[in-house]
Amino acid sequence: MAQQNEVVFAGFGGQGIMTAGQLLAYTAMEEGKHVCWIPSYGPEMRGGTANCTVVVSDKRIGSPIINHPYSACVFNRPSLEKFGGLIKKDGLLLINSSLIDVSSERDDLTEYLIPVNDIAVKVGNPKVANIIMLAAYIEMTGIIKFKSLKNMLTKKLGKKKDLLEINYSALEEGRKLAKKLVK
Amino acid sequence: MAQQNEVVFAGFGGQGIMTAGQLLAYTAMEEGKHVCWIPSYGPEMRGGTANCTVVVSDKRIGSPIINHPYSACVFNRPSLEKFGGLIKKDGLLLINSSLIDVSSERDDLTEYLIPVNDIAVKVGNPKVANIIMLAAYIEMTGIIKFKSLKNMLTKKLGKKKDLLEINYSALEEGRKLAKKLVK
Amino acid sequence: MTSSPTLIFKRPDAMSENVTHYCPGCTHGVIHRLVAESLDELGLRDRAVGVAPVGCSVLIYNYFNVDFLEAPHGRAPALATGFKRVRPDMIVFTYQGDGDLASIGMGEIVHAANRGEKFTTIFVNNAIYGMTGGQMAPTTMPNQRTTTSPAGRDVNKAGFPIRMSEMLSTLKTPSYIARVGVFTPMHIINAKKAIKKAFRLQMEGKCFSMVEVLSTCPTNWGINPIESTKWVKTDMEPYFPLGVFSDPERGDD
Amino acid sequence: MTSSPTLIFKRPDAMSENVTHYCPGCTHGVIHRLVAESLDELGLRDRAVGVAPVGCSVLIYNYFNVDFLEAPHGRAPALATGFKRVRPDMIVFTYQGDGDLASIGMGEIVHAANRGEKFTTIFVNNAIYGMTGGQMAPTTMPNQRTTTSPAGRDVNKAGFPIRMSEMLSTLKTPSYIARVGVFTPMHIINAKKAIKKAFRLQMEGKCFSMVEVLSTCPTNWGINPIESTKWVKTDMEPYFPLGVFSDPERGDD
Amino acid sequence: MPGVRIDKNYCKGCELCVHACPMHILEMSKDINLKGYYYAKLKEPTKCIGCQICAITCPDVAIDVHTHGSQFILFEY
Amino acid sequence: MPGVRIDKNYCKGCELCVHACPMHILEMSKDINLKGYYYAKLKEPTKCIGCQICAITCPDVAIDVHTHGSQFILFEY
Amino acid sequence: MAKRLMKGNEAIGEAAIAAGAPNYFAYPITPQSEVAEYLCWRLPEVDGVFVQAESEVAVGNMLFGASASGKRVFTTSSSPGISLMQETISYMAGAHLPVVFVNIMRGGPGLGGILPAQSDYFQATKGGGHGDYRIIVLAPSSVQEAVDMMLWAFDLAEKYLTPVMLIGDGMIGQMMESVEFPDKYREENNPDEIEWALTGAKGRKARICKSLFLNPEQLEENSFLLAEKYKKIKKAERRCELYNVKDDNKIIITSYGTMARICQTAIDELEGEGVSVGLFRPITLFPYPEEELYAEGSKKNIKCVLSVEMSTGQMVEDVERIMKGKKKIDFFGRTGGVVPSPDEVKDKVRKILRIKK
Amino acid sequence: MAKRLMKGNEAIGEAAIAAGAPNYFAYPITPQSEVAEYLCWRLPEVDGVFVQAESEVAVGNMLFGASASGKRVFTTSSSPGISLMQETISYMAGAHLPVVFVNIMRGGPGLGGILPAQSDYFQATKGGGHGDYRIIVLAPSSVQEAVDMMLWAFDLAEKYLTPVMLIGDGMIGQMMESVEFPDKYREENNPDEIEWALTGAKGRKARICKSLFLNPEQLEENSFLLAEKYKKIKKAERRCELYNVKDDNKIIITSYGTMARICQTAIDELEGEGVSVGLFRPITLFPYPEEELYAEGSKKNIKCVLSVEMSTGQMVEDVERIMKGKKKIDFFGRTGGVVPSPDEVKDKVRKILRIKK
Ligand SMILES: Cc1ncc(C[n+]2csc(CCOP(=O)(O)OP(=O)(O)O)c2C)c(N)n1
Ligand SMILES: Cc1ncc(C[n+]2csc(CCOP(=O)(O)OP(=O)(O)O)c2C)c(N)n1
Ligand code: SF4
Ligand code: SF4
Ligand code: SF4
Ligand code: SF4
């Protein structure tokens, strides 16, 4: 079977969850991959968790709904609780350790703790926590090229130079940390 | 097959067409027969002809719509034109000769001309033309008993003595004429 | 010395030659003619589209030399909105009875008026459902007998008749709204003016316009045509006063 | 000398213990409480039936200890009519948003009011469609930005906001119709009086009653709750003036 | 000199014109038309003042009005 | 002596009560409740006059008002 | 009770009263406005409720509200009016509410005409609204049957807590036949005895009548509950009538309502000509008497199952499905208000059997 | 044109513009309100018409009016909203008007929920309104297909002068996928070139757009005309896709829309386990690709035709009918917003084949 990767981004509304997923999807598409991004839009939306799933594949994508994704990036505790148990065996779980002080308690996953909020504050804008997570995720999976993501950010943010700079830093920080964690 | 008789009453609105049919149906029902009365309620209603069909039978009635009735009582010219050709072979056609100066031009029917409006005026109320026609029809076909019809009229008109008298006369006149015509 | 005769009153061009199916003395026919004359006089026949209701005037398209659409019961204002929005260069009008407009079509007329759709509505108020055989309408008068109010309209259960013109003219969106009658020649002459003005305002792209016309239904009222016109005057007009309720040219909006 | 404390303000009995799903600062919650308090104070909880709308308050039944019916979008007044007609001994109320009541449900509310149905409508006017994500409502203010009027409501295309209380009070059938606000404590106190009176009039079998409440939607207005209450005062109230528009006890009908 | 023409086959015999005519010169005929209606007709043609009121009144547009020469306009229509 | 009790788990942190209190004795806490909201709390309990205005304002019926002994009624509610 | 000669429309109204359901909400539409015209004076005599609504959308929703009270309620309408009730029917099915609808069908689509037709079969039996629901559909073929079925319809509606629809073509509404009503009319429901009725939360938890389930598992549960209900209905409530069904039948005609009576006349006349045809008349259209049709239709002697309808072919799809390819299926229909005559049916039969007249 | 990553709802809106149909009338409803939110700023850019109507009943009728002008028009809605349009759909079918409806289906019946479902199959394919009519029903399974089908839908609507409906579950509306639009967008229709369009009776006889035929023969004629049209459509416009259909398939799954994609994943995974299953995906639901299904489904190697739907079983009735008893028919469905996983489909297949996991 062809290569397919699935990732869930999950957290509170306002944490840039949807954007992170869309950025990944856009970039993968630009790289010529098949992609599908799908949000949850159910009753839990108001006040609860927000999440989206991105599927990236070399061939036409079957089910857009992934009950057991290969990987997840969880930004808050309810999300960990919801998705921690759903990840495929041998899958990957990235936990925002700035807000989550527990782990999945699974031993069949590769699991990393990344304090994305803390790093974001360090970088200079608490809003880029999602980008840091995304960068780390990409670094770890190689699902898309780091450079492509950077190009995509450049394209999307266009002339907002300041913002772009901070996002660049976020990317680098995420990548750096990922490299450190993995090795 | 069991005995079944069908008759169409047709004329202008206001000629008592529906009432004549209903009287027949009521009476036949009282006599224990199966009956079905059905009006036309189509687009022709406003300004056009009004008609109804009565089916009287010894057994459960099949089709309530009779495309080719055994008999018809037509009160005006458009009705003659509409139904004259539809009557079953060897059927019976009663024509209100007060308003219709032609005949069906069919030679396979028993056809009688009855000037019911003229007789009605003579009886004292132009509105009983329909009763005269009905009486004649009953006399000719024996579809119900004359007495039953009289009883029904008595029942329906109840205490309106004057009206009842005129209706009785109408019945008698109709019967008389029918007897004369048939023999 | 005799000259050849000139026709000073004749069937308007916008009307077809067909004899209507209306009952004798029913003033639907008068209202048809007023619409047709207005279209002719304003030169609009060529680019007019009418929207027929469900009601006695459901066959109105047979009586006009004008393109026509036939709407589901009550929805003519929605059809007119759809049409006019995609063809703002055309002249669109609905012709609706009181059951059609004030009962089932209440939502559509209020919203079309409120959006200020640039079409014209001719609202024929005859205080009854004509076509279906004389049932109570939202405009049926208190104590008026109909087939569904055999003891007369009971205002305690069915409420009072709805005055559409008054109601619609409370909307802030500019509009032309007038109530007229066709129960005497003088009233017909005034009705014509209102209808023509409604079309003129549409022509000028000004506003939504509606003319409510008090009409008769001799058949279902159970009285003759002359009695019917009298009944409009004595029984309907006091409750449904004639007049202009909203006028963009009067600057009262 | 300390006595044991008495509760002088507490959650009304007619309300359940559930935390609402409403956004922080949304005044739907206040209005719920006013209804519950009114039912309690009049002793009506036991024989009350509410009709929920489709809108943010679709789950209202979770917050009341009262029997509830959930209506199709806009049709609550028809359900209430049906219920009240067969159970005139019960107390029936609808709770409806502006999309529900003034847009899709226009026909139903006008006719229920016009028939003088003896139920009470709580009409929550927050100038927007809350539940579906902030689309334009019939009550959206001129130039107000919504997801379907991103450049602000264009009155030339969408018309002006509809003032339901004014419109319904033109009907001749007796009714109690008032507009209140809940944007300051003082307004809440007055709102309560109106709502309680509406229920009292129903209890007495007098008339149809409707209280329009100017409410907030901080989420879809995109401003915080305090700003929101201010916006009601500065932007909504001038167009939607508070007051009693129709009152059977004032004898103006 | 003005005059009216009633197309008897449009007429439904409602009598509104007869009632409306200010000169009282219309009446219902004793014959019926194709549709079975007693139609309106002119009783005293010479008295017609060309006011058009009968025509304006007729719901069935059965009436034409014509004139020989100029006609005094009684009202705007 | 009157007092208010705010059930922090009903509170959604809208701040309307803080704004409404005529005595300015409410404030938002620095902690969050179960739902993640910064909830309202009483800053200076002793200054409470039992006017009920905070409770009347609260959209989430998070506030109770009680009194020891009699309470002056400031308005009809 | 004595026999009465009554118009179908009026008899339907009286039958509802007999069923203890004197609560009627309606909007006029031909060919059934006589129901309202009858009930507007008849209901006050029995302390019933008559409301002329502003539209069919309102009618549906008045029924919705009234039904939730536990009282028996019904309406009558005709094709376009029934289309306007589809959203509400879906809601009431979802909320498990009993209610009886009568559709006196006229020609369609659109405004169509006012004469008899049977072209709303799909709408009634498959569900014209959205979502996984069905309604019970009954098809009377005489005025007496319409009366009997009204009584039965309320039983079914309450037994299964579901909307029930009687569909009859315009003839059923317009014709007068003799009819008997039960000697004893039923009492109205006492809402206090109904465990789901909204009667005020006095001394009990509040009740909620709804079709909203934001949680998909709960919504699915409700749909499965409905599916379970339909299964039970299919098992217990199928009804049909066989006419002239014999071992020498060459053809089985399937036909319902008054159309079936016309077929019956045709069958009688064919029998006289020595052509043996049987009639399978479904009385319940949902649940369709599937086993019964399959049993009759697949007998050795049968060459063809012929669906005769006043439509361009709707029930025939069910017949095809049910017959599972066992026999040739044929169709004859007239529509738009044209009522086929027995002669036309006979011609069609002869054509199938290649019999020259 | 370059690929774009777009949400289904927005792509559907853009596709209509590409189809030369920038005339949109709508009322908000989840899960498709983004179409309106997208078009309310996008349409003014292309001089299109955007009207937020007061209700879905009004939407349907605005489309009715606008379509009669000869311009291309469309709307989008979701299940309850579509139920409210049934009367008008029947009218437009009867009046032979082209129009495109999009139903982004949610769980029902009633208010139900807002999550994806396929339980409006009956309503769409059998006609939820009254009278003898059908509409063309298309079922895209990806955002790109939704776009392509929007273009095709307008072609079909105009070719056959009929309403066309795209039905997609909530996923189709909510997901983002890469999508391409045609390089050249179509021009809007020129009404003056359309012989039935209402353009003003200038120099020609007045045109009437209607579904009313009081004369039953004429109404029947119109119905027969419609029936003829549907026959042509059935002949020419059936579309389906086969996936993994091979001589060793034991089962053919029939499934449409995104549900088919889930089945596809299940099929891929089963293939890996050595279980061979084929997928028959109808792309047109009306006309249903009947011959094609029968051909594939009745092959010797097939044991069972399994209909997989997000409903309690609707399309399965058509499958039964079409398969004429040739094979065992089975059904698997989840509903109410519950989206079945590939695993559940696999389990069902294994169960049918009695394979232990
Ligand atoms: C949806 C629907 N409901 C009901 C009808 C039946 N119907 C036809 S005309 C009419 C009312 C007509 O009354 P009105 O609008 O007052 O017009 P009039 O006939 O008096 O001119 C009704 C209820 C219909 N055709 N469609
Ligand atoms: C028939 C139908 N159309 C549309 C919807 C979608 N819908 C749900 S709530 C709503 C509007 C809510 O707005 P409003 O009534 O103002 O209440 P709010 O949410 O602002 O309190 C709409 C359009 C629906 N559920 N049913
Ligand atoms: S029924 Fe009434 S409204 Fe209709 S044509 Fe006759 S008089 Fe006119
Ligand atoms: S969306 Fe608006 S109306 Fe709805 S709960 Fe939130 S603030 Fe209140
Ligand atoms: S008004 Fe017209 S229809 Fe009536 S009697 Fe005079 S000519 Fe005839
Ligand atoms: S008003 Fe209520 S919800 Fe808002 S902050 Fe105060 S206590 Fe909390």
Image (cartoon, coloured by chain):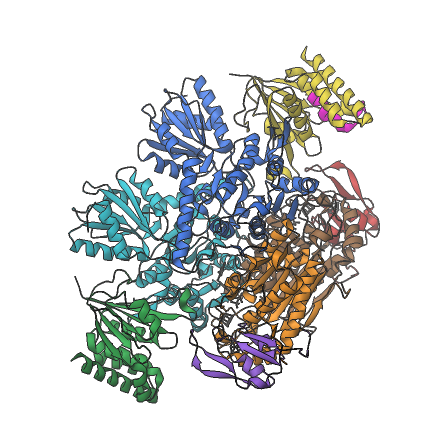
Chain colours: A yellow, B green, C orange, D brown, E purple, F red, G cyan, H blue
Of A11 and H89, nearer the camera is: H89
Residue B109 place in picture, x, y as percent: 21, 69
Say whether residue E29 is visible: yes
Residue B25 place in picture, x, y as percent: 28, 72
Of A39 and H133, nearer the camera is: H133
Say whether residue G183 is visible: no
Quarter-of-image position of residue A153: top right
Residue G217 place in picture, x, y as percent: 51, 38
Check the picture and name the quadrant holding the N terminus of chain G.
bottom left
Q: Is residue A163 above or below residue D242?
A: above
**Is residue D160 within the magenta segment?**
no
| Callout count | 0
Of G161 and H24, nearer the camera is: H24
Residue G326 place in picture, x, y as percent: 26, 37
- Which residue is outermost to the top? A183
Q: Is residue E43 above or below residue D177?
A: below
**Is residue A133 within the magenta segment?**
yes
Tell me where the magenta segment starts and ends, as one range.
A121-134
Residue at image coords 43%, 49%? G123
